[in-house]
Amino acid sequence: MKLLDLIEHHKRVNKKLQRNDVFYSFEIYPAKTERGELNLRKTMSKLADLEPLIFNITYGAGGSKNKDSLQVCKRAQQLHGLNTMLHLNVISKTRKELKELLQQARDSGIQNILALRGDLPKEGKTVDNGLEHASDLVTFIRELHGNYFGICVAGYPESHPESKSIEEDLKYLKLKVDCGANMIISQMFFDPQTFIDFRNNCRKIGITCPIIPGILPIINYKGFKAVVEMAKVHVPKEILEKVEELKDDNIKLVDYGVKLCIDMCQKLIEKGTVGLHLYCQNRFKPINRIIYGLNLRTFRCRRPFPFRKSTIKSRNN
Ligand code: FAD
């Protein structure tokens, strides 16, 4: 199902039940090793039990290929009955490859794509496919598949590091939406006000689609430093100091990261966000603490699949 339809459905059901209607989505990346793959399967199964509205699967982490991302999407859908969003970037594939991938995604029942340009390589070339920006990919998908896919694009509350100004970046974000994207997921940020200002600025220039804040819980020192460095986002001094103070005590660091994340999400909820997009870093426990800490997950509903023999027996008796 497309994310926009899922959000509508989620709102309706929760309104009826008089429950909080803020949804959450989880972002994970394909594993790099066989062991990682086994761990990911277990983690995904547990994350699935938290019933996110959708699972996003990145492309490119640790050299992963779109094929890996597609496999993870398929597994999430088939084994866990989840809706998924496949990330796709334009810089490393020919038009033919992109066309094939989109068809495979469609044949696998995937209905959501996060259309990205991808990070430019420090060395080497990008594929000369005539598609330079995420907006070109959005147009490409719409031309090939009409409205079959729900298309999300990336937005940058602090503006993209390559942009000359916030205004210029917003102009191109609007272009992505005008080309056919129906939702925006934001880059991470560590001050909720940054996101709120960004959302207001988007509205001022006529971007009306849902804008979902992307949130990176700090749950691993090295991972945090690497991601923040790569994304070139601002981290307030007091957060940086605390993270440095706790860097050798991962338990305390996770406690701090979980609390910080809950505080940030609460502020965003107060300011009317429709959803939260959590960069899960392929971890379950801290994410579980965040979802329960926010009181967004008030019931537990285990899917009956895969059936255990004992379950079938007792049902038959
Ligand atoms: P664009 O929208 O193309 O923007 C890139 C730059 O070009 C910006 O400065 C923009 O202002 C400018 N620009 C845009 N359109 C035009 C235009 N028409 N003419 C001139 N300038 C223009 N990367 C991955 O490789 N794999 C992933 O799975 C992945 N997942 C992500 C998930 C999220 C939620 C986010 C926020 C980012 C993700 N990224 C991922 C990172 C992303 O690929 C990089 O940030 C990349 O540098 C820019 O991608 P984009 O789609 O925003 O590019």
Image (spheres, rainbow, N blue to C red):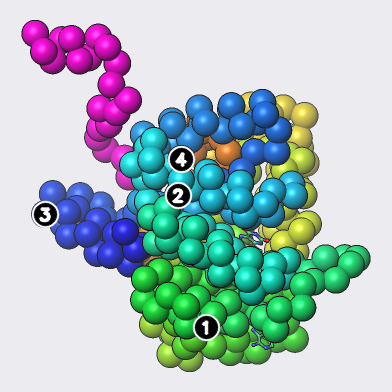
Which percent across, then down, holds residue 36?
65, 31
Q: Nearer the viewer, residue 166 or 48?
A: 48
The residue labelled by disc 3 is 16
Which mark is nearer the camera, 1 or 3? Answer: 1
Per the model, the C-alpha gap separating discs 2 and 1 is 24 Å
Mark 2 residue's CB less than 8 Å from ligand 1:
no
Determine the main secondary structure of the stretch shown in magenta.
loop
Amino acid type of disc 3? Answer: Lys
Magenta part of the chain = 296-317
Identity of the residue drawn at 27% across and 31% down:
303
Q: In terms of depth relative to the viewer, which is nearer, 13 or 42?
A: 42
Q: Quadrant of residue 130?
A: bottom right
What label sits on residue 205 in the rendered view?
none
Q: Amino acid at mark 1?
A: Thr
Q: Residues within 10 Å of mark 3 (few under 14, many from 20)?
A: few
Question: Which residue bears the numbered disc 1?
Answer: 139
Residue 293, given in percent of the width and then of the height, sits at: 40, 38
